[in-house]
Amino acid sequence: MKLLASLTSPYARKIRIVLAEKALPFELVVDSPWEANTRVPTINPLGKVPVLITDDGEAFFDSPVVAGYLETLDAAPRLLPADALARVRVRQTEALADGVTDATVAALLESRRPDGERSAGEIARQFDKVERGLSGLERRLGERDWFDGDALQLGDIAAGVCLAYLDLRFADFDWRGRHPALARFGARLFARPSFADTVPPAG
Ligand SMILES: N[C@@H](CCC(=O)N[C@@H](CS)C(=O)NCC(=O)O)C(=O)O
């Protein structure tokens, strides 16, 4: 299978980490939807990465759907529980973490708009979501090692990716100082080979 991804996309990184944790072989096709010559919109009408193309040629997007597809393959470890309600809870953690990532991306795009078009109010509004989302994640994690269950699952990966993306885009944003449980969690997660091997390039 092939994964269309940009190297800085946190959503694509989430999937690359899932693939690494499951030791699933795949071809990484680097394609940034922001470049003029991107092929992504011909495969995903939304023009976004990640997109996974199966060996049968079927395309899956967006990242929660791709993660769901990968879970159907016979590859340990399970990253979503078999129990339906437990699975919804992992998906809730994933949605909260992805939502923080969405707000971080929105703040970044707004901050890159030209002088005169940039809205400080909109950037602040997005950072309010980031801060509230991180507080929600901090409460959800509490004193535990993992968000849901007793081993790494998809919600943990999404949360780790969202924290790492804040470091990449807003290095001065001191989430560790305000969220000690997330700081402890991040330190553990970032040391995993699946995270260390997918650190995005600067830029
Ligand atoms: N909810 C989607 C978000 C994907 C997304 O926004 N990807 C960004 C890269 S970080 C993208 O491709 N943006 C291109 C665009 O918005 O045109 C997912 O989880 O896959």
Image (cartoon, rainbow, N blue to C red):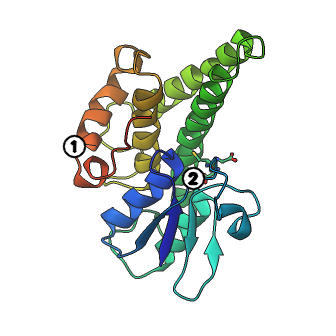
Q: Report the front residue among 184 and 193.
A: 193
Looking at the image, the residue that sits furthest to the front is 37
Examine the rendered structure and indicate whether residue 161 appears above or below residue 79.
Answer: above
Residue named by callout 2: 32
Q: Quadrant of residue 75?
A: bottom left
In the rendered image, residue 85, in percent from the top left (x then y), is placed at 57, 59
Rendering quarter of residue 186: top left
Q: Kindly identify the amino acid type of the residue bearing the numbered disc 1.
A: Ala
Label 2 C-beta lies within 8 Å of the nearest ligand 1 atom: yes
Q: Quick one: SS at disc 2?
A: loop
Q: Looking at this rendering, what residue extends furthest in the bottom direction? A: 56
Amino acid at dot 2: Ser
Q: In the image, which is nearer the foreground, mark 1 or mark 2? A: 2
Quadrant in which the C terminus is drawn: top left
Q: Residue at x 35, y 14 (%)?
A: 177
Tell me if residue 83 can be seen. Answer: no
Which mark sits nearer the N-terminus, 1 or 2? 2
Badge 1 element? loop
Q: Are marks 1 and 2 in contact (CB under 8 Å)?
A: no
- In which image quadrant can residue 24 be found? bottom left
User: In this rendering, would 9 be left or right of 20?
Assistant: right
Position above or below: 87 against 141: below
Residue depicted at x 46% and y 63%: 80
Image point 40% across, 28% down: which residue?
167
Say how many tags the image has: 2
Q: Which mark is residue 191?
A: 1
Q: Is residue 113 visible?
A: yes
